[in-house]
Amino acid sequence: MKVSYRWLNEYIDLDGISAGELAERVTRGGIEVDGVEQLNKGVGNVVVGYVKSKEKHPDADKLNVCKVDAGQGEELQIVCGARNVDAGQKVPVALIGAKLPGDFQIKRAKLRGVESQGMICSAKELGINDKLLPKEQQEGILVLPEDAAVGTPIGEVLGIDDEVLELDLTPNRSDCLSMLGVAYEAGALTGRPVKLPDISVADAAERASDYVQVRISAPEHCTRYAARYIKGVTVGPSPQWMRNRLIAAGIRPISNIVDITNYVMLEYGQPLHAFDADKIAGGRIEVRLAREGEVMVTLDDQERKLEPHMLLIADGEKPIALAGVMGGANSEVTAETANILLESARFEGGTVRKTSRQLGLRSESSIRFEKGVDDARVIPALDRAASLMARYAGGLVAEGIVQAVTREEEPAEVTVTLERINSYLGTELSTLEVKTVFGRLGFEYESDDVSGRFTVRVPSRRGDITRAVDLIEEVARLYGYDNIPTTPIEGPTTPGALTVPQAIRRELRGKLTASGLNEVISYSVTHPNRAGLFTRLGEGAKPIRLAMPMSEDRSVLRTSLVPSLLEIAAYNRNRKTDDLALFEIGSVFLTDETELTRLPQEKHRIAGLLTGSRVSTLWNRKAEPVDFYDAKGVLEAVFELLGMTGLVRYEAASIDQLHPGRTAAVLLDTARGWEPVGYVGQVHPALQLQDDLSDTYVFELELEPLYEHANFTIMQKPLPRYPAIERDIAVVLDRGVEAGRLTDEIRSAAGELLESVQIFDVYTGGKLGEDKKSVAVSLVYRHPERTLTDEEVTERHAAVVERLGQSFQAELRK
């Protein structure tokens, strides 16, 4: 919000308080002032001049020789090259010795042999942002109003002898999006009264209700709509003082009608809109929601496709405005407009915000509606604008206001006690001091001096005050934050610590990074075509679409981490990085609902990807591509870290998007039995081809079961004191027998004397047959308390061979 210091002086006497001092007080009062801008960029000795005559330069086609009266007692001769200079104009004239922005000084000079005694200036040369001027004044010299007095310093005419405070408002202080709101704030901080503008309206004999009818068909989106009818206006430029104030606020003047609506919006914080009343069918105004497929052309000449949630102002035939956002081109005020229908309303902020964002139309009006306007200012702002139109556009204001009201807004009543105020602030304020604060704020209140209770009737302009703590904050602001005593912090301190899940995720990151994998962080949203990939751990999960996605490629919440890893791998492969070892710890989002009625489940997972070579090619070795066991080895390292090695087993599995013969499910031994917690395997060749990847191996685990079963207890056992006996065995059995089942049977048959079992060779082919394989296993036997005898080991070993024969029809290989 840009606040003109001179304009603010009209509502509150700031005598003795400079703009800089006011900015300091406002900032200390809780509203940050980003800066104070001097509108005068260094203009001095520039006055209003009258061009008495213009003649062509005798020696230059593009120059003119002007005779100018600058109120100095003598006629000045000035050479000017502007195309729009002409006799009879009032213009800014920089006299000899004048200073202009950029430390430019005007001197007596000769241009092509003709003496020039000054310079006729453009807006840009005076340091004015010409983008805020009407289009006809953006090129050439600045032409001043005819009523500008010759010889008057240009700073007084253009209002550049002013300073502008730029307020950085927080969303709760929408009351300061108006000059009156800032005046109340300044009045509270300085203890000076606020003077309100004159809103008296000289009504004509005709009644507004004879021309206008108002109806609200969407009461939940609009609580009040009021209109006035002004006849016989003359559309033209607004007075110079009004244009100066709009420019200082960063708004470009357009015409007297439009400028008045913008001026009152800045003054009251209440957006207004002026319609050409003759373009409104039947004089009927209806506030309604848009219909399916309805379109309208807005003031920027863009056709807008409307949706049913958008609030419209319509007449009996068509939409004429987007409520609170922008008017329609079909009811625009033009130079031919004679009658005005003036709107002032209170639209629901959420409705305006949604329409504004969806259409990409953000205006000063929508900003104020989004943050909430004061219901008590709807009618005063309407009357103020009508009185200005009568004065500066020559209109006759029809008697009465036509309005529809669906809900009256009552000021809030908030109760607070003196004890609570002092307890919160650590102060010893008296009842009188608190009364003084409420009085300076302009709050009505009742107080009980015995109990110290205050019941405050908060003005509707301060919608941010709804609770006792809000009143305490107001007392603190006006008492002065610097005056609040410093109070030592007391109480028990609790050392910070990671939760179990946080600690486990940190340990996993450290372990995998130390093992040579690189952590990646990918988007939680993906393309709809990839949302259904690798759903083994979230079977039945439905895609969850975003309401407002960045793009179609990022429009659905992911149900697996693996598709994101594949995208990253493909991205790197396309840039000649073929050897990749990646992992990610992140969230996936699961629901079984097609239409969400509750929040989806957010689950933590860890996933990894390996592709390319484990060992790169050197002069003395060949490249070694990664395989299934590299990915499985990463998982084994994870489970070893978490103390869960004995709780996990792997089973061959068939999973969509994974290779049918190189995939395993990861099972965890829980109280409910063996449950799947993840998978590991090679990406299906068809998907690898689609992403242009070589053999790629992935894994993914649910972290919640790992949080529950992780065991960081370190188990110690003494070093063996007695020798071990090692026996090898090679058996021929069916190819479909899994290694895990084989080793489980060996452990069961060998009993407690078996210390370890390890498969060290697998052979197929030759004379074994197509469906057979030979597996060589090394068994180590040891007793912790004595030396084993050969007979004991032979007996156990024979039991192992017998069990394998019974369970798998295995035969000793000869």
Image (cartoon, grey):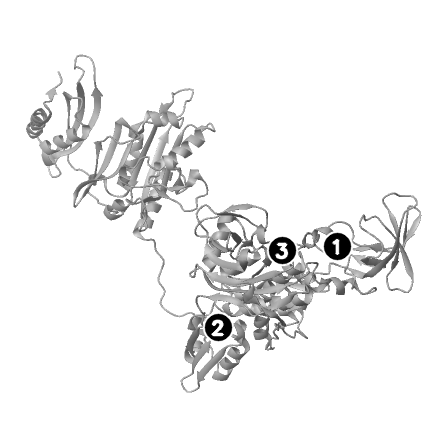
Could you give the CA–CA distance between mark 1 and mark 3, rounded to whole angstroms? 27 Å
Could you give the CA–CA distance between mark 1 and mark 2, rounded to whole angstroms? 52 Å
Q: Amino acid at mark 2?
A: Thr
Q: Nearer the viewer, residue 15 or 682?
A: 15
Residue contact at pointers 2 and 3, CB within 8 angstroms: no
Q: Amino acid at mark 3?
A: Val
Find numbered disc 3 in the image and state the secondary structure of the residue it sits on: loop
Could you give the CA–CA distance between mark 2 and mark 3, rounded to whole angstroms? 59 Å
Q: Which residue is tagged 3? A: 333
How crowded pointer 3 is (Cα within 10 Å; few <14, some 14-19, many 20+) is rated as: many
Q: Quadrant of residue 142?
A: bottom right
Q: Nearer the viewer, residue 451 or 278?
A: 278
Residue drawn at (62%, 75%) of the image? 195
Q: Nearer the viewer, residue 628 or 329?
A: 329
Find numbered disc 2 in the image and state the secondary structure of the residue it sits on: loop
Residue 220 x, y percent position in the rendering? 42, 61
Residue drawn at (68%, 75%) of the image? 15
Mark 1 vs 2, N-terminal side:
1
Q: Quadrant of residue 447?
A: bottom left
Residue 52 x, y percent position in the rendering? 88, 57
How crowded pointer 2 is (Cα within 10 Å; few <14, some 14-19, many 20+) is rated as: few
**Which numbered tag is attached to residue 123?**
1
- Left or right side of 340 for 130: right
- Left or right side of 773 for 592: right
Residue 455 x, y percent position in the rendering? 43, 79
> What is the total number of numbered labels drawn onto the structure image?
3
Q: Which residue is tagged 2? A: 486
Q: Is residue 43 above or below residue 532?
A: below
Q: Amino acid at mark 1?
A: Ala
Q: Looking at the image, is mark 1 or mark 2 nearer the viewer?
A: 1
Mark 2 vs 3, N-terminal side:
3
Mark 1 vs 3, N-terminal side:
1
